[in-house]
Image (cartoon, rainbow, N blue to C red):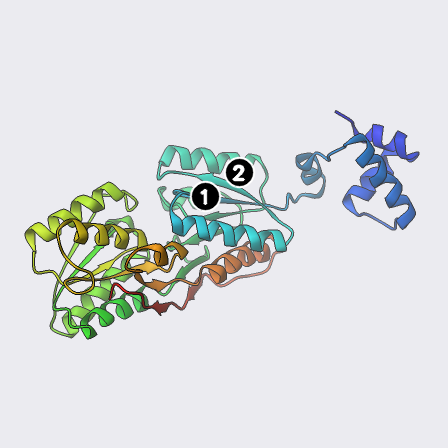
């Protein structure tokens, strides 16, 4: 592998000059820079990014830890975060925790060893103290860890109100919410609270089913939907905690001989692009994923630069009416 000394020899300059070109330090003529870049190109030289980050105390890399990149919401969100990070001069280091505490801890250690400038957390399996001990700029999604750690989320309560109100306005009188376990301590639990509050305010019967502990266990949601129709055959409205769960609800209705939206109306949450490919197209509460990604990156960059940031960052949601309601 060519070294910085090889580049200097090829360009006819000192290794210090090559280093100054790479790090844009001091005045350098365009002619000089072109000579150095031409030598790098000819030798196929690639700078050691870790070594450069050590010299300038900044890596321009942001770590992102999410539960499952294969899940549509996190796939779309990751894409938006990467795009905004790149526009801000940062690269993204992606970690897929799979809701595993040990794996999440190992990734945090790896990111710290890699000298990332900050971490965006979409996976939250650890205790609060573990996040505080990172000693890095941190932003979380859908979890309020402490008053001094910024978080980004959509307006979960308003989204739950919108979804439940729509079902009631469409004539539903036996409602069900299918979602993650309330003890997961996530802000997304506010979707259920809004569902229950809104149903009570309108005098509408409601029930809720949730997984034991893993909010991304889709097989568990399939079993819950089978249980729902077995124990409450008269259910006519379902508010699903995500669009993916809504898709499983649509599948369960079809398999049990129920028509959507004639017999059962369904609305999900997230507003993923794939929801329009289902038949019928799924109604949803759309999260502003692009703005969430932009804001998460902005909050990391501001912390890196020593600026203060707001801890609470709640973004508005929109009702995206499809054919399931």
Q: Give the SS element for disc 1.
A: strand
State which quarter of the image contains the C terminus: bottom left
Observer-nearest residue: 266 or 144? 266
State which quarter of the image contains the N terminus: top right
User: Disc 1, disc 2: CB below 8 Å?
Assistant: yes
> Which image quadrant for residue 220?
top left
Q: In this view, does 250 lie to the left or right of 68?
A: left
Observer-nearest residue: 182 or 137? 182
Q: Give the SS element for disc 2.
A: helix
Question: Where does residue 260 sit, x and y in percent of width and height?
Answer: 20, 61
Observer-nearest residue: 306 or 194? 194
Question: Where does residue 43 sit, x and y in percent of width and height?
Answer: 81, 30
Question: Where does residue 293 sit, x and y in percent of width and height?
Answer: 50, 57
Residue displayed at 22% across by 50% down = 251
Residue displayed at 16% across by 47% down = 224
Q: How far apart, in angstroms, are the residues tagged by discs 1 and 2?
A: 10 Å
Task: Please determine whether, in this image, residue 32 is positioned above or below residue 301.
Answer: above
Task: Please determine whether, in this image, residue 85 is positioned above or below residue 102.
Answer: below
First along the sequence among labels 1 and 2? 1
Q: Using a 10 Å C-alpha cutoff, classify the residue at mark 2 as few (fewer than 14 neighbours), some (14 to 19) or many (20 or more).
A: many
Q: Is residue 180 left or right of residue 203?
A: right
Q: Any mark on residue 316, and which? A: none
Q: Using a 10 Å C-alpha cutoff, classify the residue at mark 1 as few (fewer than 14 neighbours), some (14 to 19) or many (20 or more).
A: many
Residue picked out by circle 1: 65
Residue displayed at 62% across by 55% down = 87
Query: What number of labels is visible?
Result: 2
Residue picked out by circle 2: 111
Observer-nearest residue: 276 or 299? 276
């Amino acid at each position: 592998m060519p070294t910085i000394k090889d580049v200097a020899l090829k360009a006819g300059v000192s290794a210090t000059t090559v280093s100054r070109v790479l790090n844009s330090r001091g005045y350098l003529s365009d002619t000089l820079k072109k000579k150095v870049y031409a030598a790098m190109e000819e030798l196929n030289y690639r700078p050691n990014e870790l070594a450069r980050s050590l010299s300038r105390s900044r890596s321009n890399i942001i770590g992102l830890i999410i539960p499952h990149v294969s899940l549509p919401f996190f796939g779309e969100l990751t894409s938006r975060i990467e795009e905004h990070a790149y526009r801000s001069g940062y690269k993204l280091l992606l970690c897929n925790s799979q809701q595993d505490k040990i794996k999440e801890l190992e990734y945090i250690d790896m990111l710290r060893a890699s000298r990332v400038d900050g971490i965006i957390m979409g996976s939250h399996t650890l205790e609060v103290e573990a996040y505080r001990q990172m000693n890095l700029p941190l932003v979380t999604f859908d979890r309020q860890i402490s008053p001094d750690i910024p978080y980004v989320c959509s307006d979960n309560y308003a989204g739950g109100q919108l979804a439940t109100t729509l079902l009631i306005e469409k004539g539903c009188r036996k409602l069900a919410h299918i979602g993650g376990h309330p003890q997961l301590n996530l802000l997304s639990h506010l979707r259920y609270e809004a569902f229950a509050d809104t149903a009570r305010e309108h005098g509408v019967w409601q029930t809720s089913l949730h997984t034991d502990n893993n909010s991304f266990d889709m097989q568990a949601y399939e079993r819950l939907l089978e249980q729902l129709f077995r124990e409450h055959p008269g259910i006519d409205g379902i508010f699903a905690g995500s669009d993916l769960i809504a898709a499983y609800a649509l599948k369960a209705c079809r398999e049990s001989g129920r028509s959507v939206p004639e017999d059962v109306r369904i609305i999900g949450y997230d507003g993923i692009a794939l929801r329009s490919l289902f038949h019928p197209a799924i109604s949803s509460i759309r999260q502003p994923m692009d703005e969430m990604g932009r804001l998460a990156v902005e909050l990391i960059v501001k912390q890196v630069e020593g600026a203060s940031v707001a801890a609470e960052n709640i973004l508005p949601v929109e009702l995206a009416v499809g054919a399931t309601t």
